[in-house]
């Protein structure tokens, strides 16, 4: 007798399915590649555990040509995946961050936070905050032998946050949290790639694109089943009661959007509201024409992807002290 096909209970297209027997199948973001030397970019990477109690880890990237007398900016990066798929070892992210480290001449710490639904939100934010606490502890000299690259090659006066999609959302919330915390860590800027912000009431292209709006609604309601739905403060930074954007604990923000991305209008609104707030920093906007959400992850060698990486590299290197 043939076994019956398991019946789907929740379909979070195109990311994963939950079956009625309780099993979960991730459809995307499941591939992994090891850390090591990337011959295309000459960037070296390794995996480290940063929070042993929870198993939260990170992948660190450095240009292979760096010398100990060089101190490079540190970019703490949070990957995307709607909070429910992908890891730092996902091949597309690995390729993307190799290219970023090479182009910008920075050290990248890519954080592997835990995913929903096994670890519902706000676990991803808590893990990401723990990663910043770990970075701050390196500055204080808490050396357990696992972060020699940071100790030897990082200029801790030049620390940035960055992320794409859900990762950009995480970076936003961490920068808000820092201001009222006792975390001894100065963040110079945030590179926000196609930030994942949302809301119940549609704006811009969300009004006419009901299919994709429904997808994004479904993603958020799956990872964060709160009574506020898509107006939860974690996903909608513009709703009543959301923290004031003027509280961002950084000097500069670069918001990057893509013309065909349904999240584009929220990214533009973020840029607009931040520029009009009492935040004393400088905010920039970059829009890539003719491209969709996280196109650079899927087509890293395209002209537009390389242009975007160059813009990020310039952003991270503003004010950087040249190596003599």
Image (spheres, rainbow, N blue to C red):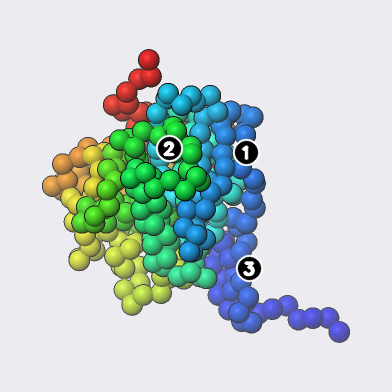
Residue 269: x, y in percent? 27, 50
Question: Is 270 displayed left or right of 79 in the figure?
Answer: left
The residue that mark 3 highlights is 25
Label 3 vs label 1: CA separation? Answer: 29 Å
Residue projecting furthest to the right? 1
Residue projecting furthest to the bottom? 1
Residue 311: x, y in percent? 39, 31
From the viewer's perspective, is residue 307 above or below residue 192? above
Residue 274: x, y in percent? 22, 47
Residue 161 or residue 64, whichever sits in front:
64
Mark 1 neighbour class, 10 Å CA radius: few under 14, some 14 to 19, many 20 or more: some
Question: Is 180 displayed left or right of 140 in the figure?
Answer: left
Judged by depth in the image, the label closer to the viewer, 3 or 1, is 1
Mark 2 neighbour class, 10 Å CA radius: few under 14, some 14 to 19, many 20 or more: some
Question: Is 309 displayed left or right of 158 in the figure?
Answer: right
Element assignment for label 1: loop
Residue at point 51%, 42% (across, down) = 60
The residue that mark 2 highlights is 151
Element assignment for label 3: strand
Label 3 vs label 2: CA separation? Answer: 39 Å
**Can residue 260 be seen at all in this image of the molecule?**
no
Residue 146 or residue 222, whichever sits in front:
146
From the viewer's perspective, is residue 138 above or below residue 221? above
Indicate the quadrant where residue 287 lies: top left
Residue 255: x, y in percent? 33, 42
The residue that mark 1 highlights is 36
Residue at point 69%, 78% (across, down) = 6
Label 2 vs label 1: CA separation? Answer: 19 Å
Residue at point 63%, 75% (across, down) = 23
Element assignment for label 2: helix
């Amino acid at each position: 007798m043939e076994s019956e096909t398991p019946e789907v209970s929740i379909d979070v297209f195109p990311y994963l399915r939950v079956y009625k027997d309780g099993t979960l199948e991730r459809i995307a973001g499941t591939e992994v590649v090891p850390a090591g030397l990337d011959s295309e970019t000459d960037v070296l990477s390794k995996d480290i555990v940063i929070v042993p109690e929870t198993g939260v880890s990170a992948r660190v990237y450095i240009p292979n040509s760096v010398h100990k007398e060089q101190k490079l900016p540190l970019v703490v990066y949070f990957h995307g995946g709607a909070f429910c798929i992908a890891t730092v070892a996902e091949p597309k992210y690995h390729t993307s961050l190799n290219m970023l480290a090479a182009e910008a001449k920075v050290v990248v710490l890519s954080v592997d936070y835990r995913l929903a639904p096994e670890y519902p939100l706000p676990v991803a934010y808590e893990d990401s905050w723990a990663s910043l606490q770990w970075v701050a502890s390196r500055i204080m000299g808490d050396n357990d032998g696992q972060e020699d690259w940071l100790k030897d090659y990082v200029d801790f006066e030049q620390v940035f946050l960055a992320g794409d999609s859900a990762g950009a959302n995480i970076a936003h919330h961490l920068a808000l949290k820092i201001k009222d915390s006792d975390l001894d860590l100065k963040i110079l800027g945030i590179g926000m790639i196609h930030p994942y912000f949302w809301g119940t009431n549609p704006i811009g292209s969300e009004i006419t694109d009901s299919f994709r709006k429904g997808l994004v609604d479904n993603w958020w309601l799956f990872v964060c089943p709160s009574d506020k739905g898509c107006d939860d403060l974690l996903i909608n930074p513009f709703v009543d009661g959301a923290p004031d954007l003027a509280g961002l604990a950084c000097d500069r923000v670069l918001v990057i959007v893509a013309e065909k991305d349904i999240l584009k209008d929220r990214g533009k609104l973020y840029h607009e509201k931040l520029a009009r707030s009492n935040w004393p920093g400088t905010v920039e906007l970059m829009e890539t024409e003719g491209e969709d959400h996280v196109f650079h992850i899927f087509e890293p060698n395209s002209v537009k992807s390389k242009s975007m990486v160059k813009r990020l590299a310039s952003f991270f290197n503003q004010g950087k002290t040249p190596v003599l």
